[in-house]
Amino acid sequence: MDRMEFIHGVTRTKVLETKLLSRAKIDRIVDAKDIDDALKVLNETEYSNSFSGLSDANDYEKVLSNELVRIYDLMRDVSADPVVVDLLALKYDYHNLKVLVKENEYNKDFSHLYVSVGSVDYKKIKQAYIEQDFDEIPIEFETAINAAVTDLQETKDPQKIDLIFDKYYFEHLYNMANETKVELFINYVKDLIDFTNVKSAIRLKKQNKEFKFYNDVILENGNIEKEEILSTFSDSIDDMINRFKNTKISASLIMGLDSYKETGRLSDFEKYMDDYLMELNKESKQINFGPEPIFSYIIAKETEIKTLRIILVAKLNNLSPEVIREKVRELYV
């Protein structure tokens, strides 16, 4: 990957960074008296481009979805190499694969659940599945589909569809990042796997799953070895805190585990994960030649959209600004 090829793209991205929502703007949205006022504030920002089709405040998801599509289209135009964007779009591909298999196996229409920002048009994947002709889509997608369908036919357990696709997604993502040889991309994926594994371990403990299920869910390729995660099968949260205190992500991981221990909510753990990954990407602000600023801008924008979704859902549920602020993610700016 030639870093000099990204000069133009990085220049454009630096301009886009100035339009990211500031903490002051987020605070104004948090302090709005209701969701209607919150959307009015949002409409004063770059998001005004994505308000087309909004007829009711409860339909705010259209604005966020429109903005996500707009940003991915823009960054595909900006990036000198599509893999920079595809690394982050891949999760939407695997989301679409889950929808596709469930739709076909249960003969239901889930068309409203597809997301149109994947690395491959979901309609193309859908057509390949219907015709059983996968020549035009990545072999990884075909392999994952076949594994999920085969398992469903054998076990009749729909819960495993998501688990199987998640496992194939993270393997695919790791291989893509590794092939770029870009340190940030590799670190991001390995750290994400570590957080995901610990989160899965907590969830499975809560569900009292047996060890075989535990072994099937925990992912390879993190900084923390899979065997180390598996060894937490009988651990308490305090044991896990002690076990992981010297890992690369230990500071945020321990805060996340402490927060989960106090509240029993995985969403609190996820906030520390998101904040850590944002801090990791802030180093891209100092880079003028290379793909990192484009990658990090997309993450910044996705985190911003997630934060807005949290705020707007909270507004619908009449939560106080103080409670909402506790849920707001770290911003890139």
Image (tube, grey):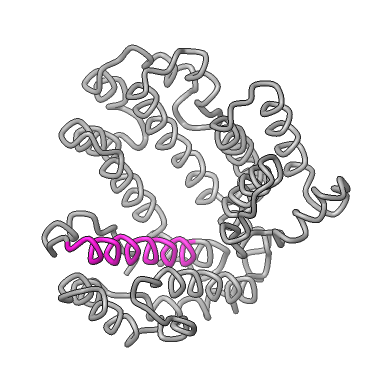
Q: Work out which quarter of the rendered image holds the C terminus and state it.
A: bottom left
Residue 135 percent location from the top left of the image: 88, 50
Q: Is residue 137 left or right of residue 267?
A: right
Q: Position of residue 331 (x, y in %)?
A: 31, 64
In the rendered image, residue 200, in percent from the top left (x then y), is placed at 42, 30
Which residue occupies the foreground of this view, 144 or 18?
Answer: 144
State the extent of the magenta-drawn residues as a range: 296-318
Magenta segment includes 46: no
Q: Residue at x 59, y 34 (%)?
A: 167
Vertical relation: 12 (above or below) 311: below
- Please give the name of the residue rendered at 44% of the width and 17% of the height, measured from the top-left corner: 230
Q: Nearer the viewer, residue 158 or 215?
A: 158
Magenta region includes residue 307: yes
Q: Quadrant of residue 272?
A: top left
Foreground residue, 81 or 306? 306
Q: Is residue 42 above or below residue 307?
A: below
How many callouts does the rendering have?
A: 0
Q: Give the dominant element type of the magenta stretch: helix, strand or loop.
A: helix
Q: Residue at x 24, y 72 (%)?
A: 26
Q: Say which of 65 and 55 sits in front.
A: 55
Q: Is residue 298 left or right of residue 111?
A: left
Where is 53 relative to 31, above or below? Answer: below
Residue drawn where x is 58% and y is 76% of the image: 74
Q: Residue furthest front?
A: 107
Q: Quadrant of the N terminus?
A: bottom right
Q: Left of 241 or right of it: where is 99?
A: right
Q: Is residue 289 above or below residue 83?
A: below
Measured from the top left, where is residue 75 in percent x and y? 58, 72
